[in-house]
Amino acid sequence: MPTADDAVDSGLLSPATAGADALVSDSAIRLAMVEVEVEYLRALETVGIAPAGLAQRMAQAEPPASVGLARRSVLGGNPVIPLLADLRAELPTDVTAWLHKGATSQDILDTALMLTAHRARAVVLERLTETAGSLARLADGHRTTVAAARTLTQHSTPTTWGLRFATWLGTVLDARDDLAALDLPAQLGGASGTLASLVALSDGPTAARMPALFAAQLGLAEYHPWHTSRAPVTRLGDALVSVTGALGVIAANVATLSRTEIAEVAEPAAHGRGASSAMPQKQNPVLSVLIRSAALRAPGLSSTLHLCAATAVDERPDGAWHAEWPTLRELLRLALGASTLAAELTSGLTVDTERVAADLALSGDDILAERAVLVGVTGQPADYLGLSDALIDAAIERARS
Amino acid sequence: MPTADDAVDSGLLSPATAGADALVSDSAIRLAMVEVEVEYLRALETVGIAPAGLAQRMAQAEPPASVGLARRSVLGGNPVIPLLADLRAELPTDVTAWLHKGATSQDILDTALMLTAHRARAVVLERLTETAGSLARLADGHRTTVAAARTLTQHSTPTTWGLRFATWLGTVLDARDDLAALDLPAQLGGASGTLASLVALSDGPTAARMPALFAAQLGLAEYHPWHTSRAPVTRLGDALVSVTGALGVIAANVATLSRTEIAEVAEPAAHGRGASSAMPQKQNPVLSVLIRSAALRAPGLSSTLHLCAATAVDERPDGAWHAEWPTLRELLRLALGASTLAAELTSGLTVDTERVAADLALSGDDILAERAVLVGVTGQPADYLGLSDALIDAAIERARS
Amino acid sequence: MPTADDAVDSGLLSPATAGADALVSDSAIRLAMVEVEVEYLRALETVGIAPAGLAQRMAQAEPPASVGLARRSVLGGNPVIPLLADLRAELPTDVTAWLHKGATSQDILDTALMLTAHRARAVVLERLTETAGSLARLADGHRTTVAAARTLTQHSTPTTWGLRFATWLGTVLDARDDLAALDLPAQLGGASGTLASLVALSDGPTAARMPALFAAQLGLAEYHPWHTSRAPVTRLGDALVSVTGALGVIAANVATLSRTEIAEVAEPAAHGRGASSAMPQKQNPVLSVLIRSAALRAPGLSSTLHLCAATAVDERPDGAWHAEWPTLRELLRLALGASTLAAELTSGLTVDTERVAADLALSGDDILAERAVLVGVTGQPADYLGLSDALIDAAIERARS
Amino acid sequence: MPTADDAVDSGLLSPATAGADALVSDSAIRLAMVEVEVEYLRALETVGIAPAGLAQRMAQAEPPASVGLARRSVLGGNPVIPLLADLRAELPTDVTAWLHKGATSQDILDTALMLTAHRARAVVLERLTETAGSLARLADGHRTTVAAARTLTQHSTPTTWGLRFATWLGTVLDARDDLAALDLPAQLGGASGTLASLVALSDGPTAARMPALFAAQLGLAEYHPWHTSRAPVTRLGDALVSVTGALGVIAANVATLSRTEIAEVAEPAAHGRGASSAMPQKQNPVLSVLIRSAALRAPGLSSTLHLCAATAVDERPDGAWHAEWPTLRELLRLALGASTLAAELTSGLTVDTERVAADLALSGDDILAERAVLVGVTGQPADYLGLSDALIDAAIERARS
């Protein structure tokens, strides 16, 4: 690949994201920028600023290899500038005459990142839907698997594994709802957010048509120029960290409840999965471990996005914008990776009902101490499940809708 | 005040929050917990579990002084336990027989924090509305105050102060929308989230009526038990950090653009404000400085909430829940303080149009270099303002709606 | 208390810090500022700038009540300004003529915070030494308590509880060493870090004597003016988060290994400790839970200090300095609280050797699978403990030195 | 390159790190792991556990291409396991019989990361030394460049650019000292930190020789097993964030003080540097912008390391360890990139002494208001520079030593 010299291959140390990141690779981002330039040009044509047909020709041309793009980004501070140089070197003059005309680097890069996020989101949502489906099945299937609930690590009262799954399901649905509800907008403001360039190239009403057109062509939402008004970025970051957090809850619980001494659940088996380099008997809950690692990493990243938003000065900030790019990309990667692993984890998660019963039995009548206090009798754990069934029903119903 | 021994007076080092924090003080939280216990008891009465009239009597009693509540919280790990002891010591036996019956500490504390947040939110929204109103007036009033836009700290193209204000306005409205849209739910799940206690005290259909009733009485939203499913908390934290971030943008810009060499805007004067302990000539942009300090602190706090959500194991987590309380409270306090200061800042912010013009003139024709490239002429800065007016109109319109 | 109107009582929601925070209360900070002004005045006298005897008289006067200090801090942006007004209102004219002369607010506040940190550190170090002593005793006493080691939640190979305690001990000692090694400097730079005021009031050589004198009188280290060079703050923050982290490791392990199903250790019993508001049988590991909550909160706070350091512009930054104060204070509070709780936790932690043996037995020969691979035999767990004893010895030796 | 399918090329969105990251690439990490396995084997030979000569043969063999290593890491949760499979597939049987024998994945990966850090540190220290040298020259050369100091964005009193540079220099030296002082240890504990495997393969005294040997061969420090005792990682992270922070201060100041209206300093010119995609006249302070972006990103990452340290349970944690790897690597990358850019920035930074004088003149006598209060006269700014010269001398002296 001709971009190899730019490659900072960084997948090795983040197995939680391996195999899920083609959508957010340098190459994907570079191609998204080219695509955004094409659609910008197409919008210029549609409103009559640029002559017709250029965008189509540009779209059909091979994107430039853009060797050393990252390194060349240092000079201007962003990758759009050297990418434009590469495009200009390869495209015919009549196209380059209109390429990027009236736009600013931030229009292209913000939009390309939102386009990338838009595509990554679709995959994350799909994985969350799979995960939710699996959890709904597990919840339904374990309505009567009475288990010890635990608070502050200690047995508390009875619950069911069905309700536990339903609770995880609700958490996943909360995150899915947040992610799905996001408007991911295109960016179009020109050099300083006034769109003066487009007005100069046409007139006010014509220029005013551009933002909606540009956004629609890319499948993105329309918004006023948001060069220094970064809700689109922080909302996305908040939704992504909510996704890794929701999956982190599942992972933390599976890791805990598959401990040797507890062993109520087990991750799906696969050849070689969970093996140790030194101890042949081990079966590590490795999917949970990796999802958990993503969940631990995401909050620090999302806080960086809020920090950048809070320090966005002038009409384009001096570093806060630049710090967003790799941070947002890493959050997308973590959500992609964690949701892929979680879909696999939940699709084959098994409950060892004998161990569940044995663990519950450890507490004997103590698990019903609350009941004894309230109504004077203990009875069987299965008699003290409250609204478990109704709560399971509600969660499954919500997952379906 | 009898709770003095609990007081960890901590306002001194956070002037950004001073005077705005009565709503989130220890005393307010303590009274909110009492109020929640009252409404829980009232709901028990309404559905027929508890005899009628107890809640009313409890509501009329003086809340206990609860001396040393914080210190006594250490034993059980949360303040509900010693508060209940204090309530039981002071209330008549027929009331205490039903007090807290069937509830768990987390029901009370989560609900009390949401009730506190609900009240604090109303104030923050009011301050944001004032701020938005001021920004709308400023935007309208400075449509023709042509100014240098700046990107990466350098003059870029012309803009107007009206559009700059409109952009800040849009940022504030984004944050206001996020905060206003939140459902702040009551918590009701019982010991382990099954509501088994309420079913034991009545029956399934009766118990099932409780969550909605309880929530409605407190003016909160209804939700399934969310003991370990923390979207209500992280969404609130995300909205609050978005508020301080939006106000931080205003502050960063005012601080920057009131620099001695730039001096385009000035904070509203007040006797003694912005004075220095050593330099009598100084007029520091102290409102901006304090708002900015809040904006810098909030992201780290919001990330802690996401971290806690992501590590919520079992049916009640072993520390992640406890780490949320002071963190969420501090975020509420920062939003209250920053929004109060921002309302004051924007209400009296002045633009020095002569300095604006002088600063713009520094760049001469260079400020129109983009225009020259695009259409071959420079002209006057006022000729190159693009959609500034329309964008101002749209922002003002949005603020009004 | 006359400062009540300033009190933002915030201990209630942070039981992890309750009872350990008198050293960092508003009152303590206020008195530290007065003390710093006294010692600054004394240094002025010592070098001959101010007439002799003033500092002594100021030290003997009752510090002003400073009602509403936090609220009054808003005007100037920091509490030194209104505190000086209060001092000037109460002290005789000949004292006030020299009070604060040549100093700047940041000199006083930075120094007061370092003085506070210096005192809090002594307590934290004492608690860490107690904790280390307890862990050393536990390590020594459980050299032969053979237990299952666990990696990625699963039994791995044998270890001893003695080595586990020794490892925690090493972690605590690492944190203690970092905290103990810190130089906590006084701050003295004058308005803009040049000490021009002191030179104007005397001469270069005289002014040059001031920083060392001032620092020595307060028991602090000397350093060049660090108004915008914040290593003293970030190093302190890093050491404090290392303390809560080291204690967090103990807490996480105790919470995990006292789970109902594992139950190898138990927190020390105390009347009412670990009780539940709903479930009478429960014995929650509440010390661990609270320490853990501190450990989860600290990293976000320490990152804020680094952020502030990284954005310290000019000769005094516009918000980054102000954001440090409450953040550093909260970190001190968390370290004080967590170390106090940890000292108690470790002083009475018990190991249930029968449960340890039973848990180990769950894995049977599997716990020796590595040994079988390496040398072809399994044998007894006690035969496969490697350097456990030597590592315990080394840790105990280190704790003693 | 055969590892291309693992490449998650991520340099494009982080120009702040471009060109400085070969030392921390996937390829570098992979080769470091191989090197660590070689040296482990060599240590086994030295103490007489393994037959002589194997390590030498392994060192001379071509490292395996390890196609798809990241993806294959998912199964076992870390890259050591598939790397070992690749090594075993290519090396002769007598070598593989001893390869990794007695070690655990964490020994290899922790050590490889420390080895990587050790090498990256050397480069960062070199860049910091260059930066410090440039700042020392600038400080010395601008002793008499009298300038306006600024506090809270406003002119305060006079200072010199020499002292400003000296202050930045002191900040850089603080960070350099912290980084240089670190012990970066090898990791050797075996499966669960007892070194039982090595004792089983030899005897106690022999096994006890291994850690020091292993560390020494790699140029690393010796330490007791630190699988769950993570001070080596957090200390490194703290030092790295201090580096980006110190450089961030320079960048923030240069960006601010090169604003169009202030323009006291300018970044070194280079063909194409600082160009805009839309505005031909622009000269953006792009080195500062990129350094600043690194400084904004690092604090969130360092907090993740502390979080991981604080949640390290058992004898190897279930995710906290895994979250460290990419986080630590990214911090190394940011320090490498920022220090490279800072060395360039400071090597050619220019001061426009006319603009400095003009800016200073804006405040007229007001800049001497403090002096007037103190001694009743204003005079010339050059008369009110305090210990500027001595502070410059001290900083330069420190840089030299």
Image (cartoon, coloured by chain):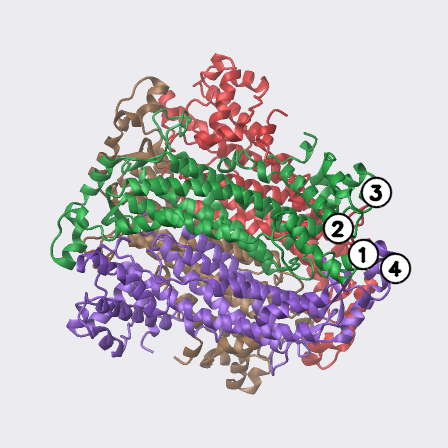
Chain colours: A green, B purple, C brown, D red
Q: Position of residue D285 (x, y in %)?
A: 74, 54
Q: Are marks 2 and 4 in contact (CB under 8 Å)?
A: no
At mark 3, the secondary structure is helix
Mark 4 crowdedness (10 Å alpha carbons): few <14, some 14-19, many ≥20:
few
Q: Are marks 2 and 1 in contact (CB under 8 Å)?
A: yes
Residue designated by label 3 = A94
Host chain of mark 1 = A
Residue designated by label 2 = A44
- Marks 2 and 3: same chain? yes
The answer to whether any part of residue B313 appears in the image is no
Residue designated by label 4 = B377
Q: What's the residue at 44%, 29% (across, down)?
A: D75
Please, what is the three-letter code of the amino acid marked with disc 1? Leu
Residue designated by label 1 = A201
Please, what is the three-letter code of the amino acid marked with disc 3? Asp
Question: Which of labels 4 and 1 is toward the front?
Answer: 1
Please, what is the three-letter code of the amino acid marked with disc 2? Leu
Answer left or right for C368 relative to D171: left
Residues at marks 2 and 1, CA–CA distance in whole angstroms: 10 Å
At mark 1, the secondary structure is helix
